[in-house]
Image (cartoon, helix red, strand yellow):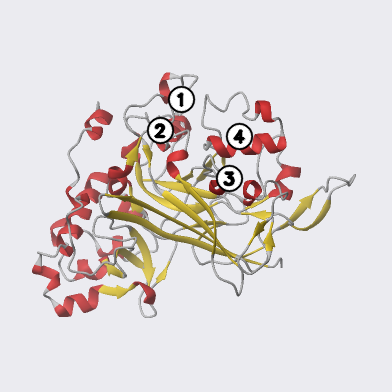
Amino acid sequence: MLGEFITFAPMIKANDPSLKSWIEVQPNSDFPIQNLPFGIFKTQSSTSRVGVAIGDQVIDLLMLNKLGFLSDFKIEDSVFDNQYLNDFIALGKPFCSTFRQRISNLLNENNAELRDNKIARSKVLHSITNVQMQMPVKVGDYTDFYSSIDHATNVGTMFRDPANALLPNWKHLPVGYHGRASSIVVSGTPFHRPKGQTKPADAELPVFGPSKSLDFELEVAFIIGKSTELGQSVSTADADNYIFGVTLFNDWSARDIQTWEYVPLGPFLAKNFASTISPWVVTLEALEPFRTAGYQQEPKVLPYLEYKGEKNIDINLEVLLQPEKGEENLICRSNYKFMYWTMEQQLAHHTVNGCNINIGDLMASGTISGPTPDSYGSMLELSWKGTKPLKLKDGTERKFINDNDTVILRGYCEKDGVRIGFGEAAGKLLPAL
Ligand code: MN
């Protein structure tokens, strides 16, 4: 019932494409007034606190609260004077929705409250280039799925059997594994090439050393906005009420370590050394106008995985590779709509056995590949296991990621003249320690 109500609900006021802000927003900006993503930032002179991005500005919500602009909500300063969004998210989705509406009103071109208060504006607004973005949430648990049919088909074709690329369970459940939360880092955080055990194809015994095939994985993650009790399950119809928002996510992977270690329990040290998250959490609410139909799921899924309505989301995704002194190379263009399993199905599956979830938990999509070779979401697929190296603008080639390369994920939705972007998830690979 609730799911159907949400599907046919009228347009959310804060998403109205005709809204304009008194803050100037460039047409190619990720952060128009219809977006209003939440993040954690600090400046040279301030503590970490909750902010909202608009155009090239960040609004300091702690200061906004202190100055009385949010007084109707009666929120303790400590919710905003915080290293993480978890306490804010815990106020509840209906609350966060009303709150986002208030920010939208305050920034509306016709609202003079803040617009004409020069002193308040100078205290509340920061140029986005002058702030340092932090981890947006404290991630308790991190799960990674494997839900792109093109990615799973490519990997199955490369490593097993092109005729039976998908394993028998793949179209019946969203395959996933539990990842490592401690090593999730915010965009801009460099990390070292991991070392580990690998077994070269021609060797009898494994060897130890730096990974020789370090890869990225283009993913989108959702952040849990409501906790459950042990034993409770979340239905696909109710799932959106448990999802606060969405970020970009790079699930860095060491393919040579993975190949040797993954049998029979799946990835371990090949993926737990670093994962990069974008700092701005785009609310699920801001993404509602970009919902689109998903795959026809054949064979038919079990009843607990069925869902109603259009639940995929049309998010354009890009991957750029930047050598240390070179320019950015666009190496992949994909889209979140290519997901076979929706986030609602992933969450329903994750909790169907009674597994409890907590605010701030992060669930990542799995590598998002599209149907064409330029839309593959990993080097493994783009270079087809290293057999087709990518040529970069500086004349060099890549089968995998080199030391001192930076990989940048970007994403945006676009419709009716509104562009809802995610900022970026960038990470630089440093040489092994
Ligand atoms: Mn992954």
Quarter-of-image position of residue 288? top left
Front residue of 152 and 61: 152
Calculate the distance from the C-alpha at mark 1 to the C-alpha at mark 4.
15 Å
Please give the residue where the numbered disc 4 appears in the rendered image: 153
Question: What amino acid is labelled 3 in the image?
Answer: Pro
Please tell me whether mark 3 sits on a helix, a strand or a loop. helix
Looking at marks 1 and 4 on the same chain, the residue that comes earlier in the sequence is marked by: 4
Calculate the distance from the C-alpha at mark 2 to the C-alpha at mark 4.
17 Å
How packed is label 1: few (under 14 Cα within 10 Å), some, or many (20 or more)?
few
For ligand 1, the image quadrant comes to: top right
Residue 114 coordinates in the image, percent (x, y): 14, 70
Tell me the tag on residue 113.
none
How packed is label 4: few (under 14 Cα within 10 Å), some, or many (20 or more)?
many
> Does the Cβ of the disc 2 residue fall within 8 Å of ligand 1?
no
Calculate the distance from the C-alpha at mark 1 to the C-alpha at mark 3.
23 Å
Query: Is the Cβ of the residue at disc 2 closer than 8 Å to that at disc 4?
Result: no
Please give the residue where the numbered disc 3 appears in the rendered image: 373
Question: What amino acid is labelled 4 in the image?
Answer: Thr
Q: Residue at x 42, y 38 (%)?
A: 343
Quarter-of-image position of residue 345? top left
Q: Residue at x 74, y 57 (%)?
A: 212
Please tell me whether mark 2 sits on a helix, a strand or a loop. loop
Please give the residue where the numbered disc 2 appears in the rendered image: 294
Looking at marks 2 and 4 on the same chain, the residue that comes earlier in the sequence is marked by: 4
The quarter in which the N terminus is drawn is top left
Please give the residue where the numbered disc 1 appears in the rendered image: 297
